[in-house]
Amino acid sequence: MNDAVMNTDKEIMEIDKVAFEGPNNPDRGYTMRVSYLKEPNNADALVEIFKDGAQVRQFTFPAYKVYNLQAHFRDIVDGEIDKNTHGLSLAAWNGIDGVFIVGD
């Protein structure tokens, strides 16, 4: 794939390959495409969110967490509709912060 995109710092990021697209049945019209990036940006992935086929959001996300986006896609869509980033925060959460271990 020879696609390139420019981030907000005017840096060109080149797409390596698509990690996934979907869901096959849009959730309230929303779908996403997540692509791995080539070096020097290969620690990140490009995330594109679409509503009825039109891109509504584009951002980079840690490549090792991209499958959290699928797990929280319904939350992400809820956030898009409600105009907040709560679903994206859930997908980015490390699973540890905010958890208290109660000892004896």
Image (cartoon, rainbow, N blue to C red):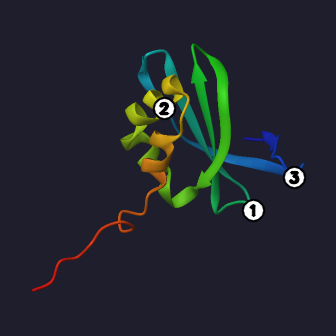
Which amino acid lies under the numbered mark 2 shown in the image of this protein?
Answer: Gly
Q: Residue furthest left?
A: 104
Camera-side mark, 3 or 1: 3
Read off the residue under disc 3: 11
Q: Give the mark nearer the N terminus: 3 vs 2.
A: 3
User: On screen, 99 above or below 47?
Assistant: below
Read off the residue under disc 1: 39
At horizontal 53% and vertical 40% (from top left) the residue drawn is 85
Q: Give the mark nearer the N terminus: 3 vs 1.
A: 3
Say what secondary structure mark 1 lies in: loop
**Crowd class of label 3 (few under 14; some 14 to 19; many from 20; radius 10 Å):** few
Q: Residue furthest bottom?
A: 104
At horizontal 51% and vertical 60% (from top left) the residue drawn is 64
| Numbered badge on residue 63 | none
Mark 3 vs mark 2, CA separation in Å: 28 Å
Which amino acid lies under the numbered mark 3 shown in the image of this protein?
Answer: Glu
Q: Position of residue 92 (x, y in %)?
A: 48, 54
Read off the residue under disc 2: 79
> Do the residues under discs 2 and 1 have CB atoms within 8 angstroms?
no
